[in-house]
Each structure stands twice: as C-alpha cells, then as structure tokens.
Amino acid sequence: MGILSELGDLRRFNSLKHLAGYVGIAPGIHQSGASNKAMGMNPRSNRLIRSYFVEASWQAIRTDPVMQAYYRTHLGKEDKKIIIKIAHKLLSRTLAVIKTETPYQIGVVA
C-alpha cells in the first residue's frame, strides 16, 4: 500500500525507464562531450519508494522461486547490486500488473 500511495497512478509514466528514474533505481549518467560516466543510483529520487522496493526484493528472494534462481545465478557479485537488479525487476512487474490489470503470480516469469 505504501508503494501505491507514494507513486499514485503508475499509468502516468510513459515507460519503465521513466518510472525507474523516479524511484531512483535507474543509474545516473554524467555526459560531457564524448565522455560518459556511470554515477550509480540517482540521489534526487524518492528514497522512501526506493527503500520499499529494496526491502521487497529481499522478501522476493525468499518467496519467489524465479527471483531466487536469478539471485543464485549472480552469487559472488556484490549483493547490493544484485538487490537493485531484483528491485528493478519488481518495479517492472509492478508496472505490468497495474497497466495490464492482471494479478501478480509468484513464480511466473514475466
């Protein structure tokens, strides 16, 4: 409920990229001339929503077999980076559930 109350109507976002930027899960990029630099997560985002998705990612690893398999295939890398990737997947699924008006099913590949 916290996610929906903070985000409002998800249909106002044109794409997952725009929503991920608003939530702060999309990486920031600094471009100057021909140089590009990845900055990590965007600090000018809604931190409360980002924390909701990060916490939901930890729960998804425990309960969703698809997310567990994704986490296990990336073991050995930095845990925080894997969690952000899973949070991005959950954000994608959340947007799909709202836009298509179909219920979320645990264990189904989206």
Image (cartoon, helix red, strand yellow):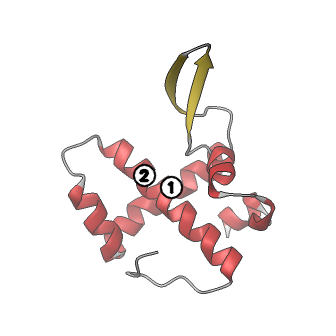
Q: Is residue 33 above or below residue 64?
A: above
Q: Which mark is residue 13?
A: none
Q: Quadrant of the N terminus?
A: bottom right
Q: Residue at x 53, y 57 (%)?
A: 53
Q: Residue at 50% x, 55% y: name it.
A: 88
- Residue that carries the numbered disc 1 in the rendered image: 88
x, y percent for residue 107: 37, 81
> Is the Cβ of the residue at disc 1 closer than 8 Å to that at disc 2?
yes
Report x, y in % for residue 57: 43, 60
Q: State whether residue 93 is above or below residue 28.
A: below
Which residue is at a point 61% across and 43% down the rendered structure image? 24
The image shows residue 96, relative to residue 13, as above or below, that is: below
Residue 31, x across and y down, in percent:
60, 20
Element assignment for label 1: helix
Q: Regarding mark 2 in the picture, which secondary structure is present there? A: helix
Residue 100: image x %, image y %? 67, 80
**In this picture, is 15 found above or below 97?**
above
Identify which amino acid the numbered label 1 is placed on. Answer: His
The residue type indicated by label 2 comes to Lys
Q: CA distance from mark 1 to mark 2?
A: 5 Å
Q: Which residue, as the protein is rendered here, is positioned at the far top?
A: 33
Q: Quadrant of residue 61?
A: bottom left
Tally the marks.
2
Residue, disc 2: 85
Disc 1 crowd rating (10 Å Cα; few below 14, some 14-19, many 20+) is: many
Q: Residue at x 41, y 82 (%)?
A: 108
**Side of 17 relative to 108 (left or right):** right
Furthest-front residue in view? 34
Q: Is residue 85 left or right of residue 3?
A: left
- Answer with left or right where residue 52 lies relative to residue 46: left
